[in-house]
Amino acid sequence: MQSEAPGRPHRTSFVIAAAGIAALGGFLFGYDTGVISGAILFISKTFSISTQMKEFVVSIVLVGALCGAMVAGYIADRIGRRRTLLTAGVLFIAGALVSAFATTVLLLLIGRFIVGVAIGFSSVTSPLYISEVSPAGMRGGLVSLYQLAITIGILAAFAIDYSLSRAGAWQWMLGVAVIPALILVLGMIVMPESPRYLFKMGKDTDARAVLRKMRSGADISSEEQSIRDALSGLQIGSRAAIVLNLRFALFVGIGLAVLQQVTGINTVIYYGPQIFQMAGFHSASSSILATAAVGIVNVLLTIVAIVFSDRLGRKPLLYAGCAGMALALVALALSFGVHGLASQRGAIALISLMAYVGCFAFSLGPIVWLLISEIYPLRSRGLGMSVATFSNWTANFVVAQSFLTIISALGQAYTFLLYAGLSVVTIVFVRYAVPETKREELERIEVYVPASPRA
Ligand code: BGC
C-alpha cells in the first residue's frame, strides 16, 4: 500500500471541490487579463479612439487590480475569505456586464476598472482560501490549481477572441466572463468559510465542523490545537519548523511577487504576437498561432507543479524553473543579437519562448502564489498577502507599460538579456531568503515581531 503524505486524509474530494471553486477566481484573472488583447482591435474600430486611449483601455484593468489587491486583505481579515470571494464574483459579473453593454468609452473604462478590482480581490483571496482549507501534505498541489486556472483562463480568452474575431464581437468577448463568475458566486454560496478564519473569529464549533468535513475522516485534534496555539499567541517555539521575523516575511513576499513579474512573463502573455513578428513571423495569423502554442505549454507545464510541489518542495522547482527561464531568454537574445542566426530567428524564438513559459509555469507562476499564502501568520495573513499581491500588480503594470519603450531603447537582444539577468537574481534570492514550506502545517511557520531594544 502507498504511504499517505503527512496531513493527507483518505478522502479528499470535498477539499478538492472547495479549492476548485476558489480557483475559478484564477480562471477569471487569466481570462480577463488575456481577453483584451484581441478585443481591443475591434473596440478601437467601434469607438475610433487614439492610440493613447487604446493603451488606457488595455491597462486600466491592471490599475483596478492593484487597487483591489491593496484593500482585499483587510476585507478578507474583516468579513472573511468566503464573503470576499463572493464579492469578487459579484464584481466580476458587474464589470463584465458594464463592459459588454458599454455605449461610450467612459463606460467601457468603468467596466474594465471594476473587473480589475475583482481580479485584485480574487488574486489575494483565492490562494489564501485554498491554502487555509488544504491539508499540509496537499497544499502545494491545491494552490497550484489556482495557477492552472489562470493559465486555462488565458488560453480560453485566446480561443474566444480567435473564434469571435470574424464577427468582431468584442461585446461577447468581454461579456461571456459572466458565466464562470456566476459559477464562482454559486459555488462560494455552497462552500464553507475557511476553518482557520472561523477559529480566528472565535467560532470554534463551526470551525471544527468545517475542518472535520475538509479532512473527511482524519483526526483533526492536532491541527486544531496548533491553530488555537498560534491564535492565542502561545509560543510554539520548539515545535516551529520555520521561524521568520515579520519584517523579513514581508520582504520575502514582496521580493517574490516583484521578481515573478520583472523576469518578464507578461511581455510574452501580453505581447506574444508582436514578439513573434519581430522574430520574423510574417503573417499575423502565424504569430497568433505561435502564441497559442505557448499558451498550451503554459497550461500543461503547470501540472508539473501540481504533482511535484509537495513531493520535491517549492525551492527545487524554483531553482530549476528560473535556471531554465534564464537559458531560454539568453537563446532568444542571441537569436536577435547574432547576425548569423537571423535566418533561424523564427524557429529559435518559438522554441525558446515555449521553454521560457514552460519553465515559468512550474516555478515562479504557481510557487509565488503558494509561498505568499503560506509565510504570514493567521493573525495578519490577509494583510501580508495584500501587500505582496499589490506589489505583484504594480510590477506587472510597470513591466507592461515599459516593455516596448525598453525594446526601442536597448534593442531586443539586451532587453531579453535583462530579463535573463533578473531570473538569475531570482535564484540567488530564493537561495538566501526563501524558506522551504513543503508539507509544513501553516502554524509551524512562525512569524514574530522582534522586541525593540528599548523594551
Ligand atoms: C502571473 C501573471 C501571469 C500568469 C501567466 C501568473 O502567476 O501572476 O501575471 O500573467 O501567471 O500564466
Image (cartoon, helix red, strand yellow):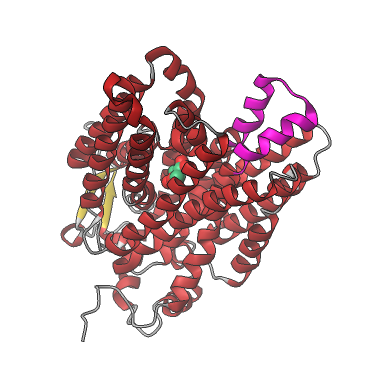
Rendered view: 234 above or below 433: below
- The answer to whether 156 appears left or right of 310 in the picture is right
Residue under the image location 29 percent in, 26 percent down:
341
Relative image position of residue 233 (x, y in whole percent): 32, 56
Q: How many marks?
A: 0
Rendered view: 139 above or below 75: below
Residue under the image location 32 percent in, 44 percent down:
355
Mark yes or no: residue 386 visible.
no
Q: Locate the N terminus and report the quarter of the image it occupies.
A: bottom left
Q: Locate the C terminus and report the quarter of the image it occupies.
A: top left
Which quadrant holds residue 331? top left
Q: Nearest the camera: 364 or 51?
A: 51
Relative image position of residue 394 (x, y in whole percent): 48, 31
Name the magenta segment's main secondary structure.
helix
Residue 60 inside the magenta-drawn segment = yes
Q: Residue furthest top?
A: 409
Which quadrant holds residue 264? top left
Ligand 1 falls in quadrant: top left
Relative image position of residue 251 (x, y in whole percent): 31, 36
Q: Nearest the camera: 405 or 450?
A: 405
Q: Nearest the camera: 300 or 345?
A: 345
Which quadrant holds residue 342? top left
Mark yes or no: residue 440 visible.
yes
For the record, the magenta segment spans 35-61
Relative image position of residue 48 (x, y in whole percent): 77, 25
Residue under the image location 35 percent in, 63 percent down:
141
- The answer to whether 215 appears left or right of 166 in the picture is left
